[in-house]
Image (cartoon, rainbow, N blue to C red):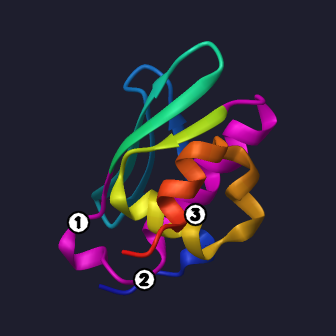
Amino acid sequence: MEFNLDDVVVRHNEEARRFEATVNGLRALLTYRLLPDRIVLPHTEVPPPLEGRGLAAKLTRAVLDFARAHQLTVVPLCPYVADFLRKNTEYQDLVSPSDLQKILAPQ
């Protein structure tokens, strides 16, 4: 299934509490729980035909940019988001020091 990642639009679906992107009728999503001072990220889901093309990273960047804009601390419960944060140091300031220590600990 071909698509250009630059053409994919990430939408913030506040009612469903998720960030989502639809490609060829298939929806990828990153769910969240919003608390007064933080955003909890429990789950990222990309349909198998769309996996491995950067869609989860695009969703993750969108939600992390949202967290930064709203001055929210990120709680990365989702293993994908934790791995993304491990690899993308520019977002690590969004995570509490104790959570960051867990993310960066040897696996």
Q: Position of residue 65 (x, y in %)?
A: 72, 48
Q: Nearer the viewer, residue 47 or 92?
A: 92
Residues under numbered marks 3 and 1 in contact, where contact means CB atoms less than 8 Å apart: no
For disc 2, the marked residue is 53
Neighbor class of circle 1 (other Cα within 10 Å; few <14, some 14-19, many 20+) is few
Q: Quadrant of the N terminus?
A: bottom left
Q: Position of residue 103 (x, y in %)?
A: 49, 60
- Residue 68, image quadrant: top right
Residue type at tag 1: Pro
Neighbor class of circle 3 (other Cα within 10 Å; few <14, some 14-19, many 20+) is many
Q: Position of residue 53 (x, y in %)?
A: 42, 82
Kindly tell me whether residue 38 is visible in this rendering. Answer: yes
Instruction: Tell whether position 47 is magenta.
Output: yes
Residue sitting at x 42%, y 27%: 17
* Highlighted range, magenta: 44-72
As displayed, is residue 39 above or below residue 97? above
Residue sitting at x 43%, y 19%: 15
> Could you tell me how many numbered marks the image carries?
3
